[in-house]
Image (cartoon, grey):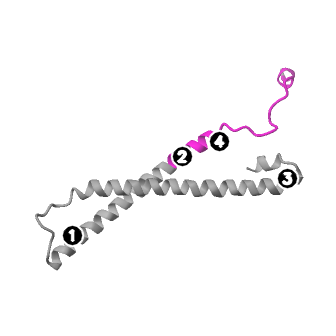
Amino acid sequence: MTAGLAALPATKTNQGSALSNVARQTSAALGLAVLNALSTGQQAQLLADRSALLPAADAPPSDAEGIRRLYGHYRELAAQVLATSYANVFLVIAVITGAGALLALFLRKPGVEAAPGAAASMH
């Protein structure tokens, strides 16, 4: 972003800075919304998949001890699902960050390009 702002004339620096801030804030909000949607969708799927693993009962428990046991199973299951979904979202973030870092290695610095005759004169 700094190179983009440096390329602007001095009279347009304020507008360029404002546009840069708006783009940064908007992309951050959209990225967070996408990651939240990914996490929520995965939590719903994992909860549906893993709730089938709970012991089946013919009828819901009617005594207080049975309800407490069932609630304990639910809390443990919800905690496992939350941890798994966050771990998967962090993995997605790590892959995206790694790809961005890899692509950043190929960026060229402005003004570093050699003149066409410079390479011939070095030999």
Marks 1 & 3, CB-CB < 8 Å contact: no
Measure how far apart labels 3 and 4 are at the Cα level. Answer: 27 Å
Say which of marks 2 and 1 sits in front. 1
Q: Give the residues in magenta.
A: 94-122
Residue 70's disc is 1
Marks 3 & 4, CB-CB < 8 Å contact: no
In the picture, measured across the screen, residue 31 lies left or right of residue 111, that is left
Other-residue count near label 3 (Cα within 10 Å), few / some / many at <14 / 14–19 / ≥20: few
Q: Is residue 33 magenta?
A: no
Q: In the image, what residue occupies the spot 77% across and 47% down?
A: 4
Q: In the image, what residue occupies the spot 29% across and 56% down?
A: 48
| Residue position marked by numbered label 4 in the rendering | 104
* Residue type, label 1: Leu
* Residue type, label 4: Ala
| Residue position marked by numbered label 3 in the rendering | 12
Say which of marks 4 and 1 sits in front. 1
Above/below status of 12 relative to 107 = below
